[in-house]
Amino acid sequence: MKLADKYLGGTIADVAKEIQTGALSPAELVSAQLERIEQVDSKLHSYITVDKEGALAQARQMEEEIEKGRYRGPLHGIPIGLKDLIDTAGVKTTYGSPIYENHVPGEDAEVVRRLKEAGAIIIGKQHTHQFAYGPTGDRSHVGPARNPYDTEKMTGGSSSGSAAGTAAGLCFGSLGTDTGGSVRIPSSFCGVVGMKPTYGRVSKRGVFPLSWSLDHVGPITRTVLDNAIMLNYIAGYDEKDPDAVPADKEDFTRWIGKDLHGMAIGIPRRFFYDDLNPEIEQALNETAAVFEKLGAAVKEVDIPSIQRISDAQKVILRCEAYAVHEKHLADYPDDWDDEVKERLLTAIGTSGADFANALRMKKQGTAEFDRILEQVDVLLAPTLPILPPEVNGRFTDGSMDESRHIRWTITKLTGPTDLTGHPSISVPCGFSKDGMPIGAQLIGEKFAEAKLYQFAYALEEELALPKVKLDIKT
């Protein structure tokens, strides 16, 4: 076994120590990573583009810096993947669509610039649902992504390849985007950690939009600590992003490992716990019991307008997505997945009054979440109400009723905080009897990501679940 091979299933935090001391070279690690991608990814399709030459060149540069005594920090020399919605200078970026099949951006997105400045190696561009407009991860011009735990199952989307690649040891972490749950959904389905930060915390400049007022960029990793490390480097005010929110620089790892005594968890039973798969319900009840064991008080809370909040998120999403793609629909009428195109066209029947009412509900819903989170430290809910369906599965009850389309089931529990902008993290909390991952969702006050990491880490340590799926079977 090559030295680097034994590290491919490891964590950023642990591998960073080996790189810093010189025990592991970035060039060797990246070479091993590229070899694993070549051997395994034909089963998963987690990458659309692998930048082999660019990654090796970056690795050699990072290795030379180590030799000269310059160490940039825990991302130095670490292979990271990017959802193929995020621009990379000189590297093909397709947005999951044949319209941009040969598109090569001229400059990096701001989050990519920050990752490179931290010493991260951008290994490639990862599978996304076409233009990120779908939560299943099986609609792209390159075909479906597949779940490392069962390749017949969905990854979830739209950050499908980012979650699958991270879970399968094809990168140490990745960046996704989240508009209706697209970081947290695939993270839950694939058994990894996914953070949707506070709206405006992370720059969106250079990230192709789906919905200007709902889009978030966030990290996907194997562990909570790794996730906080990545957010440390990508967060920060960007004056060129009109939606960026000024905030003091902080260390998101600072409360990791601190106990939970005297803290409180809210359970929003109504809406979030309705119609759950029984195995998910059991896993979430056990998760609440773990938090009680760790010293946190658990109490039920209620968000009065939660259904209207959910509905408003859908209205804003479809209106803004149509606005983004109106010209694409006119200029490229045949270059669409039928499902994505049909969904875009539903916005035509939405009135200006509908949109205005949704904007009003955004303010009201945000205030309701704020009030509840003054009473408790975090909210605990399932990330998803169902286990991963089979690839191309579409209706939850075998019908063809649009209201029962799987997209609404998958995004039900994640969409509300995309509307309100509150930070939300999905962390693994168990497995089904068939071995499929289950995720718990923690929701916090705005700019309280460090507190979410504190709770998520405590759960992770107590459960000690597997962190990576290296044996991919078809």
Image (tube, grey):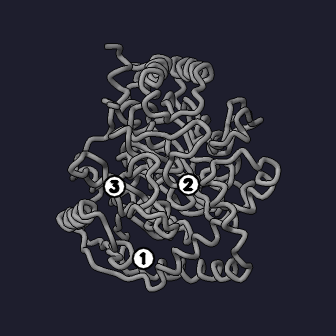
Badge 1 is on which residue?
A: 373
- Tell me which amino acid carries mark 1: Leu
- Tell me which amino acid carries mark 2: Gly
- Tell me which amino acid carries mark 3: Leu
Local SS, label 2: loop
Badge 3 is on which residue?
A: 387
Query: Looking at the image, which residue sits at the far front?
Result: 399
Q: Residues within 10 Å of mark 2 (few under 14, many from 20)?
A: many
Whether residue 427 sits left or right of residue 391 in the image: it is: left
Tell me which residue sits at (60%, 54%) in the image: 339
Which residue is more in the foreground, 260 or 269?
269
Label 1 – label 3 distance at C-alpha? 28 Å
Q: Quadrant of the N terminus?
A: top left
Badge 2 is on which residue?
A: 134
Q: Is residue 425 above or below residue 97?
A: below
Whether residue 315 sits left or right of residue 19 in the image: it is: right
